[in-house]
Image (spheres, rainbow, N blue to C red):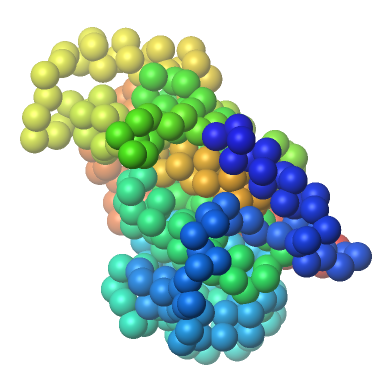
Amino acid sequence: NDSLAATNQRKMDSKDVKQDASCCSPVCVHNPHLDALKDDVLYHFSLGTGTHDLPAMFGDVKFVCVGGSPWRMKSFIEYIAAELSMEDPKAEYPNICAGTDRYAMYKVGPVLSVSHGMGIPSIAIMLHELIKLLHHAHCTDVTIIRIGTSGGIGLEPGTVVVTKQSVDATFQPKFEQVILGKTVVRNTDLDQSLAEELLQCSKELSQFETVIGNTMCTMDFYEGQARLDGAFCSYTEKDKQDYLSKAKEARVCNIEMESSVFAAMCKLSGLRAAVVCVTLLDRLKGDQLSSSHEVLHSYQQRPQILVGSYIKKQLKAK
Ligand code: R2B
Ligand code: URA
């Protein structure tokens, strides 16, 4: 992990990397085998270097927002288009990945919106291809934000959490993956200044409560998050409460299923990354998502509103 990160830093500092005076941070891949490929097929996007002009399609991307549901990522791009007054808000936005039903992708101006499905394996596959796409397109200075949902710990439902550190189910700030039969440990640091800027932006918006804290990333929604309402459960209500109390002591504010690998992969590729998730319920009080569709829908718009206002502010400052 450290050697990968160090090599990437050297690459970023090196004069071999195409840079101009205003652009300094490329999107790094670290894979010598890629150079040997004649064409790179981004299979799960139904895109590729041999079939698409990726620099022409994506070279201007500066902000990437990712989230679980394809529907939500479409509604995000419509919202952004209206916010930035960039296009007719009633225009139809084509799904750039229409050739596959694995992920959906939308673009307006410098903003790209991509769905990632549920869980670490799903987002990891998407991120491998997204990072290669941004690299092939020669994008520079890209900020990437996951906008999502989560279960809160001792927070009023609807609170937005900006992640300080992503931790695993043992509250450690690391992401473990088995590669060639060996466990590789990667760090889950996110960009602290970006998190602070998002928090500040939310204060200025003053539309909903936003906090900064740790986010626990689990491998499952039910037993993995200490729920009592899955198909299987071998622990008591007290065991659950004890575990969630320990999480709270470790400053965990919310629980979701993608932040650790997201943080790890973005760090390795030199992307400035943040995680912004709304809490749909307070896990100290229950497990079932029983609020009305309208309430849940309005909560889910909060990360979009916050990130939309952040992007608008950044583009205005240019
Ligand atoms: C949040 O919500 C999903 C589970 O309902 C999962 O993708 C996550 O991280
Ligand atoms: N997403 C999760 O992963 N957990 C929750 O409790 C709610 C949304």
Left or right placement of residue 89 versus residue 150 in this view: right
Q: Residue at x 31, y 77 (%)?
A: 100
Q: Residue at x 55, y 66 (%)?
A: 35
Q: Residue at x 36, y 61 (%)?
A: 69
Q: Residue at x 26, y 17 (%)?
A: 240
- Residue 189 lies in what quarter of the image? top right
On the image, the x and y values in percent for residue 156 come to 46, 33
Judge whether 45 appears above or below 214 on screen. Answer: below
Judge whether 224 appears above or below 12 on screen. Answer: above
On the image, the x and y values in percent for residue 303 come to 54, 52
> Can residue 215 be seen by looking at this rendering?
no
Seen from the viewer's position, the closer of residues 178 and 45 is 178
Left or right placement of residue 277 versus residue 108 in this view: left
- Residue 217 lies in what quarter of the image? top left
On the image, the x and y values in percent for residue 144 come to 60, 55
On the image, the x and y values in percent for residue 187 come to 54, 32
Residue lying at the far right of the rendered structure? 21
- The quarter in which the C terminus is drawn is bottom right
Judge whether 36 appears above or below 173 on screen. Answer: below
> Can residue 48 be seen by looking at this rendering?
yes
Residue lying at the far front of the rendered structure? 36
Seen from the viewer's position, the closer of residues 49 and 123 is 49
Seen from the viewer's position, the closer of residues 156 and 122 is 122
Judge whether 39 appears above or below 314 on screen. Answer: below
